Image (tube, rainbow, N blue to C red):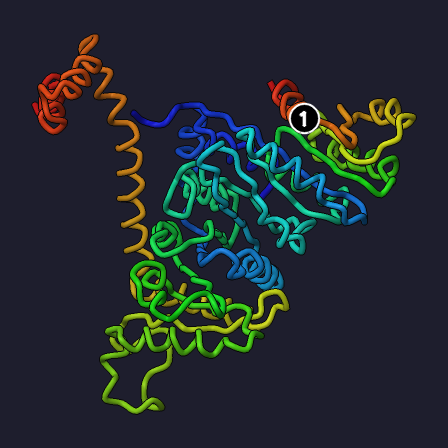
Amino acid sequence: MGNRRALARAISLVEDDQPEGPQILSDLYAHTGRAHVIGVTGSPGAGKSTLVNALARSYRAAGLTVGVIAVDPSSPFSGGALLGDRIRMRDLTGDPGVFIRSMASRGSLGGLARATFDVVQLMDAAGFDRILVETVGAGQAEVEIAEAAHTTIVVEAPGMGDEVQTFKAGLLEIADILVVNKADRSDVDRTVLALQAMQSLGSAAAAHHHLTVDERPGPGRQPDGSWLPPIVKTVAAEGRGIETVRGWAEEHARYLRETNGYARHEGQRAAASIRHILYERLPAMLLARLPEGYWERMIRDVVNRDVAPHAAVDALLRAGNWLG
Amino acid sequence: MSRPMNERKIRVLIAKPGLDGHDRGAKVVARALRDAGMEVIYTGIRQTPEMIAEAALQEDVDVVGLSVLSGAHMSLCPRIIEQLRAQGLGDVPVLLGGIVPEEDLARLQAIGIRAVFGPGANTQDIVSYIRQAVR
């Protein structure tokens, strides 16, 4: 973890898309792949930052070092951002075993910033044992975190909408651990029941519906090798339930190791990384091979309805000699 | 086509050192900087000099903005500047906002505070100052 300044600078270079960024990432790549990456997502106000703060403290008490990446939204109007997650992470300052970095989403819509996974790599290479990634306050479709993290924690709080919200697609499907925070509220059990009801419709639970409640296997690893997300009640602001969440995160890591889940995740991750980089680079390479004025002419033809966009791209790919 | 290359965002740390809880000014400035397209890391109140320097380091900010309304600026500012230097951040411009008597200005500048913005300061002036300071 030697040079914190160097890590901070490297993150900026990668985040700002400076020319040194890809080189740094390539140089460090061999030193990555050791950290367990834990994503924390959920609605705005559910308590993500507070949970991250409490979890990080818990990991520190267990002797593990922690990198934190906290993503907040950029304004679509000014491009600026107000990054306020550190307010709830003040317990972590002054500890050399913790490094917190705030990131603005910079136009990304999946709940993370474009460079978030690159920053995970930098922290991984810097030697942090656990990396906690907090997404922007997510609604239903911001599920990118499941691709970046080994273990995804979805945080809910009581009173955040009727139970049909929890049946909708997206966020709950990516949860490895479900946390119901602010469990000191009176309506917490309704939220827990709604989540349990949702789970009881899933395949893991359906396989055991002939059993009585007491006979059914508990959450976590199932006899058929699948994973049923545990539902954990917490009061993160007071540290209540946090050890249980950490215990499940470690249990999930063990599950991934024993079921080849890590390898599968790494494979998906590698494919996604290569695809992202390819998609970023290809257009510039393609356009560089076009004859002078071709791009402008093509746009004019499409505007004039002489050519449809699909046909224009077919012609462009032929002109750039990309179809061989 | 693809996103612009080499886009550098200005990153600013806005912190309230000391014990006063009057954070409206800090929030107004944070909001103005955000609206000017900057990324503002807002740490909230009751920050120690060590916390501020550590946040400035981890967040790799271009500018540190402090807000003090308790009158403790003459004891807090030197300690913050010292902590920033200890972290190797002596070249990061530090701005101060709040209630600062005229007679303190020269001494604040001598210890390394780049600029002071008092009550009634125009947020646009702060934006312009930061843009020119980080160029």
Circle 1: residue type: Ile
A89 sits to left or right of A108: right
Image coords of residue B55 (percent x, y): 65, 41
Residue A28, image x and y in percent? Answer: 44, 37
Kindly give the residue lying farthest to the right in the view shown. B103
Q: Quadrant of the N terminus of chain A?
A: top right
**Where residue A53 sits in the image (x, y, percent)?**
59, 58
* Looking at the image, residue A119 lies above or below residue A312: below
Is A13 situated above or below A146?
above
* Residue A196 horizontal side relative to residue B120, left or right: left
Q: In which quarter of the image is residue A163?
A: bottom left
Is B126 on the left-hand or right-hand side of A159?
Answer: right
Q: Is residue A289 above or below residue A323?
A: above
Most foreground residue, A24 or A288 = A288
The answer to whether residue A114 is visible is: yes
Q: Can residue A243 be seen in this snapshot?
A: no
